[in-house]
Image (tube, helix red, strand yellow):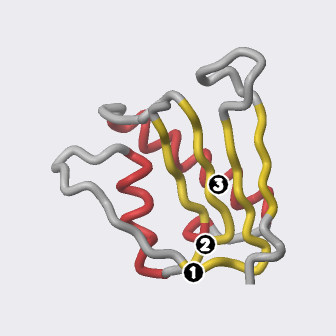
Amino acid sequence: MFNNIKIYTTNCGLKYKNRDDLLVIHFPKGANVAGVFTKSSMPASPIKWCKKIIEKHHAKALIVNSGNANAFTGKIGDEAVIKTVNEVAKEFGCHQDEVYVSSSLS
């Protein structure tokens, strides 16, 4: 089922200079999704987004950035997630609710 996964990495200057710090995984045929989320009353914007769409259990893309947890960013963080999701969805020709966003402190 996963023989068509496409993985992209690049350096965006988020954390490192001259090292990749952004990962995008594209699932052209789609992938089943399940999730376990924090119980925090203050979840980061990517968590709120993924919780909102997880009930569909389907993904076409996952984007992961390094070095930025996107926590306590408020409206700006929410807007950044939406902008990211819209651009990735447009790039891969899928719906926004098929794009999952993750941030990582590494």
As drawn, which residue projects farthest toward the top? Answer: 17
Residue linked to disc 3: 86
Labels in figure, total: 3
Please indicate whether residue 98 sits to the left or right of residue 19 in the image.
left
Q: Residue at x 59, y 46 (%)?
A: 64
Residue 54, position as x, y percentages in the image: 43, 73
Q: For the residues marked 3 and 1, what is the alpha-carbon distance in whole angstroms?
A: 20 Å
Please indicate whether residue 99 sits to the left or right of residue 13 in the image.
left
Q: Under tag 3, what secondary structure? A: helix
Residue linked to disc 1: 32
- Mark 1 and mark 2 lie on one chain; the one further toward the N terminus is 1
How packed mark 1 is, by other alpha carbons closer than 10 Å (few <14, some 14-19, many 20 or more), is: few
* Residue type at the position of mark 1: Asn
- The image quadrant that residue 22 belongs to is top right
Residue 96, position as x, y percentages in the image: 60, 65
How packed mark 3 is, by other alpha carbons closer than 10 Å (few <14, some 14-19, many 20 or more), is: some
Judge depth for marks 3 and 1 and give the one in front.
1
Quadrant assignment for the N terminus: bottom right
Q: Under tag 1, what secondary structure? A: strand
Please indicate whether residue 26 sits to the left or right of residue 103 in the image.
right
Residue 85, position as x, y percentages in the image: 60, 54
Q: In the rendered view, tell whether residue 21 sits above or below residue 91.
A: above
Q: For the residues marked 1 and 2, what is the alpha-carbon distance in whole angstroms?
A: 6 Å
In the image shown, does 37 or 100 lie closer to the viewer? 37
- The image quadrant that residue 76 belongs to is top left
Q: In the rendered view, tell whether residue 103 sits above or below residue 35.
A: above
Residue 15, position as x, y percentages in the image: 59, 21
- The image quadrant that residue 35 belongs to is bottom left
* Residue type at the position of mark 3: Asn
Q: Residue at x 44, y 75 (%)?
A: 34
Judge depth for marks 3 and 2 and give the one in front.
2
Residue linked to disc 2: 59
